[in-house]
Image (spheres, grey):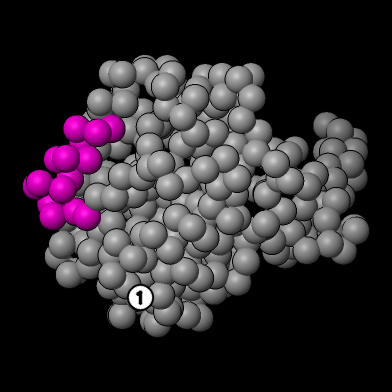
């Protein structure tokens, strides 16, 4: 038994130390999450317009065109649960906050918990950099080494000494996402439609209640909540499930009527042309500038 324990300690203790050292090292490699957390700790007090939401906001709404003191806390696949967490985390620090902008997309209300999706590893960033209390410090959601994708990416950047921040200084999705021409093929549209289609409607009430709570929260703090449906390409819109689309539209009416939410619907806005899109439901950099300028005009910022 003593021999076994000795061998165990000789083998596993160095292994655990090595894994711990690698985990610490990759945490120190900056990314868009760590950048935004650090930025908010230093600058939250002067923010007037705060953008939350998924990639539709991260790549589609550029704070540079929303007036002074605007910043984006949006990120790819960011669920309403984490939007609400970020709002509650920073609301008291944002002494000058006037408005919050958040997207309401075709998939928003049927979106499952981030933890249950293929990109569950994104949750690690909220625990590591925003100190999100949703999961234990000993869970897989607290360690980059628990998933090979972010760990490998960060480790590669560490060894290459490359910066891993895919957003600009105001939190807008970095132009590396921009393609030379939009991918609007039928195959690409079909893939996005499959990704955004409801597998079931089990999370609808949960997501509705989160948005209702955010609306009430903004009301009590005298902050305008602006809900935006971003543009999509016509071949995407034409193939949407009518039931799922009606669910989004009717809830937008509820938010506007019951909670005084400002709703801006650009889903089928004819002002947006092919070059304004990166794919059938994400804006290009030029499209984001155009959309953000229109939002600012409609809100009289």
Residue nearest the viewer, comparing 17 with 53: 53
Say whether residue 254 is magenta.
yes
Horizontal side of residue 13 vs 244, given as left or right: right
Q: Is residue 39 above or below residue 100?
A: below
Is the magenta region chiefly helix, strand or loop? Answer: helix
Query: Which residue in the structure is indicated by mark 1?
Result: 48
Q: Quadrant of residue 246?
A: top left
Compared with 224, 3 (above or below) is above
User: Residue shown at 54%/33% (left/top)?
Assistant: 280
Q: Residue at x 86, y 33 (%)?
A: 4
Q: Position of residue 94 (x, y in %)?
A: 34, 75
Q: Nearer the viewer, residue 290 or 75?
A: 290
Look at 41% across and 69% down and name the residue there.
Answer: 66
Q: Secondary structure at mark 1?
A: loop
Question: Which quarter shows the C terminus?
Answer: bottom left
Can residue 174 be spotted in the picture?
yes
User: Percent from the top left, x then y, of residue 191?
Assistant: 59, 22
| Magenta region, residue range | 248-262
Q: Can you give x and y, in whole percent of width and height, for residue 224 in the image?
A: 23, 64
Q: Is residue 49 left or right of residue 73?
A: left
Q: As drawn, is 79 to the left or to the right of 157?
A: left
Residue extending furthest toward the left: 258
């Amino acid at each position: 038994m003593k021999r076994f324990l000795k061998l165990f300690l000789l083998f596993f203790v160095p292994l655990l130390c090595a894994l711990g050292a690698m985990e610490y090292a990759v945490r120190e490699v900056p990314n868009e999450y760590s950048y935004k957390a650090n930025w908010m700790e230093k600058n939250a007090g002067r923010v007037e317009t705060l953008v939350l939401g998924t990639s539709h906001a991260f790549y589609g709404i550029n704070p540079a065109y929303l007036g002074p003191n605007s910043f984006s806390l949006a990120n790819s696949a960011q669920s309403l649960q984490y939007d609400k967490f970020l709002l509650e985390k920073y609301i008291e620090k944002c002494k000058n906050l006037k408005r919050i902008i958040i997207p309401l997309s075709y998939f928003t209300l049927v979106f499952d918990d981030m933890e249950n999706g293929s990109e569950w590893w994104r949750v690690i960033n909220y625990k590591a950099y925003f100190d999100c209390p949703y999961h234990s410090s000993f869970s897989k959601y607290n360690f980059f080494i628990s998933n090979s994708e972010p760990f490998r990416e960060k480790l590669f950047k560490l060894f290459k000494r490359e910066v891993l921040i895919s957003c600009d200084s105001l939190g807008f999705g970095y132009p590396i996402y921009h393609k030379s021409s939009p991918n609007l093929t039928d195959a690409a549209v079909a893939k996005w439609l499959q990704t955004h289609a409801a597998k079931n409607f089990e999370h609808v009430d949960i997501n509705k209640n989160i948005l209702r709570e955010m609306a009430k929260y903004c009301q009590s703090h005298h902050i305008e909540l602006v809900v935006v449906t971003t543009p999509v390409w016509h071949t995407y819109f034409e193939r949407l499930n009518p039931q799922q689309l009606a669910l989004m539209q009717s809830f937008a009416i509820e938010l506007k009527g019951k909670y005084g939410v400002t709703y801006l619907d650009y889903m089928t806005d004819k002002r947006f042309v092919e070059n304004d899109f990166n794919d059938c439901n994400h804006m290009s950099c030029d499209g984001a500038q155009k959309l953000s300028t229109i939002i600012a005009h409609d809100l009289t910022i």
